[in-house]
Image (tube, grey):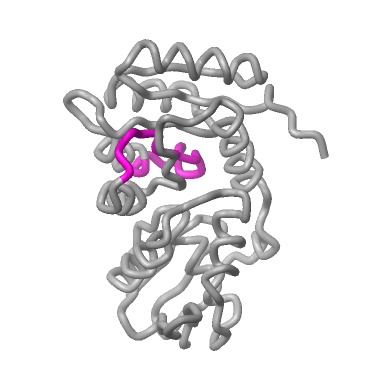
């Protein structure tokens, strides 16, 4: 199926005019509908107004940095399905971990060639707009008084709604789809992020740790050197 770029809206957030202009030019040439913001506050306002499919978000922003901006965006229900990719010159592990913990979907390190960036963007958009096979399932029991509501994208624990970023929700949904099955790290990467998206080695570990913090330590078991499985 042909990938129609003109269907998608992308918001670029960076405080450097040259970078904004460069990325804007290349994305518009590819056919995307592009919007710009130079601060976290402006990014949130523009995102609420335009409801973009994807946000390219720099981490080093004035006043409100990219991590804080991402956290605020993830609190807005209408932007829950918006894909957020950090685009930054900072490649340290702790920056990547902070980005994923804030609810980011990908972490792209500058400098990056336009063709590579566009390829990454298309992979992210294709992945986020491909319906899951179990999308029609409304309630899936996790264990006891913990439930997953796939239509409303929430997990309910002891009657309380848990806030899970999109990737954490998808990862949990994958693990509980086959309790007891060991999902390899490669399977998880390919299913949740797509085999064309490159993410750091610790990405899965970060998401698993955050899930354990929210639903409890006893449900997700590490199979050393292989992957993870859900114990119901």
- Nearer to the camera, 187 or 39: 187
Q: Is residue 215 above or below residue 74?
A: below
The segment highlighted magenta reads: 74-91
Image location (x, y in percent) of residue 144: 42, 85
Q: Residue 182 lies in magenta, yes or no?
A: no
Q: In which quadrant of the rendered view does residue 60 lie?
A: top left
- Nearer to the camera, 132 or 203: 203
Q: Residue at x 53, y 77 (%)?
A: 176
Q: In which quadrant of the rendered view does residue 46 lie?
A: top left
- Nearer to the camera, 144 or 88: 88
Q: Residue 87 lies in magenta, yes or no?
A: yes
- Nearer to the camera, 214 or 92: 92
Image location (x, y in percent) of residue 5: 68, 26
Q: In this view, does 150 lie to the left or right of 14?
A: right
Q: In this view, does 169 lie above or below 122?
A: below
Residue lying farthest right? 1
Q: In this view, does 16 lie to the left or right of 84?
A: left
Q: In this view, does 39 lie above or below 106?
A: above
Image location (x, y in percent) of residue 205: 37, 67
Number of marks in picture: 0
Q: Which residue is drawn at 48% across and 69% down?
A: 172
Q: In this view, does 187 lie above or below 54?
A: below
Considering the image in quadrants, where does the N terminus appear? top right
Q: Is residue 101 left or right of residue 153?
A: left
Q: In which quadrant of the rendered view does residue 45 lie?
A: top left
């Amino acid at each position: 199926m042909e990938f129609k770029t003109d269907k998608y809206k992308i918001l670029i957030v960076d405080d450097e005019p040259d970078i904004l202009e460069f990325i804007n030019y290349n994305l518009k040439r590819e056919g995307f509908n592009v919007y710009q913001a130079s601060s976290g506050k402006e990014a949130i306002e523009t995102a609420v107004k335009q409801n973009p499919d994807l946000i390219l978000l720099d981490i080093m922003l004035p006043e409100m940095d990219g991590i804080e901006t991402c956290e605020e965006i993830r609190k807005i229900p209408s932007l829950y399905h918006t894909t957020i990719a950090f685009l930054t010159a900072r490649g340290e592990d702790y920056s990547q971990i902070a980005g994923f913990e804030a609810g980011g979907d990908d972490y792209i390190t500058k400098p990056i060639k336009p063709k590579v960036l566009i390829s990454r963007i298309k992979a992210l958009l294709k992945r986020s707009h491909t319906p899951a096979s179990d999308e029609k399932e409304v309630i899936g029991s996790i264990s006891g008084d913990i439930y997953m509501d796939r239509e409303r994208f929430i997990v309910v624990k002891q009657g309380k709604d848990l806030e899970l970023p999109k990737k954490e929700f998808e990862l949990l949904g994958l693990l509980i789809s086959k309790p007891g099955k060991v999902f390899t790290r490669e399977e998880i990467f390919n299913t949740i992020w797509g085999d064309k998206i490159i993410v750091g080695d610790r990405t899965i570990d970060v998401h698993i740790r955050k899930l354990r913090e929210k639903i409890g330590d006893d449900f997700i078991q590490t199979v050393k050197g292989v992957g993870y499985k859900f114990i119901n």
